[in-house]
Image: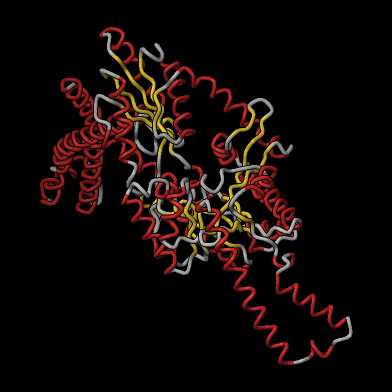
Amino acid sequence: MAATTSQSLAKNVRLLKGTASKYAIYGVIIAFIAIAVATSGAAYFQSGTITISGLIDAQKSNGALWLLDFMPFFFAFWGQYVSAVMAYEASAMVIDQTSELRAQTTALEQRAMHDVTHDALTDLPNRVLFRDRLEQALHAAQHDSTHTAILMMDLDRFKEINDTLGHFNGDRLLKQVAARLQGIIQEPATVARLGGDEFAILLPKILVVKDATEVARKIGKALQAPFGLEGLKLDVQASIGIAVYPEHGSDADTLLQRADVAMYMAKQEKTGYIVYDPKHDKHSPHRLTLMGELRHAIESDELVLYYQPKAKIKTGEIAEVEALVRWQHPQHDLMPPDEFIPLAERTGLIKPLTIWVLNHALRQHSIWKEQGLDIGVAVNMSAHGLLDLELPDLIAGVLASHNAAPDRLVLEITETSIMVDQERALQILTRLADMGVRLSIDDFGTGYSSLAYLSKLPVCEIKIDKSFVMDMNENEKHAMIVRATIDLAHNLGLEVIAEGTCAKEIFAQLESLDCDAAQGHYISPPISAEEFEHWRNESQWRPKYVPSDKVSIAQLIDTESMSGTRMGNPSLIDDPELKAEKSAANTKIRDLENYIGQLDGKLKRSGG
């Protein structure tokens, strides 16, 4: 390389020197012409003519011409020297620039090769490089008779974050996730981003499947800490599918496909991670089929609502039920919401699904109202639906179409859905509260939200998550959380509903903690509207009746008084003292009715 550069330099010097020397010769010629012109002029001024002898005499007698005679030699020497220096410097400059351009070209080529095999956002290996490394790992595993594992990871509810906070913030979140994964996964393992919110981890050599599940557990633990984004603390979780060579496949395509199937199952069952099992294969085409059928199911009324009652703890009164959607599929029978709600959120069908649930829940409320029952309905809202600016107007229209009072509708929202975009959520929730719609925070205690912010929300109740309630009679820490939550809510002027009330002992404990209402299998599992009719007649819990349709003892007294008037005794009704006594009697009778109702509820719950 050095010899080539030296030869190139010598060649360039000769070329440039030759070019510069040519102009030095031009200078010498010009100098000779100048000497001739000057000598001729001097001879003419001396003799009046220009002759050879006159020119010689002029040269001899004029000292200035002697200096001029040295000019060609000076120009020749100076030209040769300067041309050599300029040629060398110019050649060196050309070679330096050429080397720099070559270095830049090499860097660009290396960068282009890097971009082909790496993700532009996170700088992790992309699908191309991951697949290449996977095939190399499989070849080595076949040769050494070892195991290789791949983990496919997908972020839960990432689309909601992307839709509400924008793609820029979604990209920032992905970069934070990539950084955490790089902190866990060390060489020779590979962590790659395959696209969107999908990541993959290659473990080229493992001893047993448990090694792969241990890595999945570490990833789940690393993602538990909230992510900071736009001043928010976001709770981000992931679903991981695991496939191992040779147990689950012998080639790259099979392992990738089966790891993806396992990941889908982990997302569906909310288990964090799942190792591939052949029985999971049926769910992959099943999922694709459901995605195409869900819109038709909404339009064709294949969905049904189940209702889970909420009981007032002090009185045993059922004033409200939670509406829970199910899919009565023609081939798959009754499907739980976990199988199709995520599909609705991913395919943009969550809005028409929410409208369907609101319409049918309020229609059932109207039917109960016609039967004399004053039972409100609660509907769950997804984060996507909560942040829809059209939601208040949509709900106003649905309420009007069913002639339902706004306060008989409760919207249950989760902490995490509120915290996705606090300002927009507060704006929409305030509009709904101003309409009279009641708002409830569902699964309270499971999100990473600010209590100071929650205190500003126009909500009327909170629901303690069932994970704290179901074992509170055995888990003292959970009992303390329930107690503290009830005290906090009451101090904020909110009612408290305890989910997961599954036993009489838990109900009694909630009563001792002054909890307002309970929901769970001890009161009733989710039941259809038809089953609700039988349940309310046989259950120890009594539904709330519409006040205008309720005939009380006080109303009977009023009826008798009116009868007396019609029988010709108007003076009895008009007597002021009698009016005052009747009013006091009515008040005492109503108090007595309420007390009897509370006592009756307690007797039924205690088995008396």
Quarter of the rendering occupied by the N terminus? top left
Above or below for 288 versus 368: above
The one of 502 and 54 positioned closer to us in this rendering: 502
Quadrant in the rendering for residue 191: top left
Residue 184: image location, x then y, percent:
27, 35
Residue 382: image location, x then y, percent:
55, 48
Q: Give the side of residue 239 with respect to residue 409, left or right.
A: left
Snapshot colouring: secondary structure
Residue 333: image location, x then y, percent:
64, 29
Residue at image point 60% right, 71% down = 592
Q: Give the side of residue 460 with respect to residue 534, left or right.
A: left
Residue at image point 57% right, 36% down = 336
Residue at image point 42% right, 30% down = 194
Above or below for 425 versus 381: below
Quadrant in the rendering for residue 142: top left
Above or below for 204 versus 400: above
Q: Give the side of residue 366 with respect to residue 476, left or right.
A: right
Quadrant in the rendering for residue 335: top right
The one of 59 and 132 positioned closer to us in this rendering: 132
The residue most toward the top is 143
Residue 443 visible in this rendered orientation of the protein: yes
The residue most toward the bottom is 576
Residue at image point 21% right, 48% down = 43
Residue 167 visible in this rendered orientation of the protein: no
Residue 39: image location, x then y, percent:
20, 46
The one of 167 and 552 positioned closer to us in this rendering: 552
Q: Give the side of residue 578 with respect to residue 519, left or right.
A: right
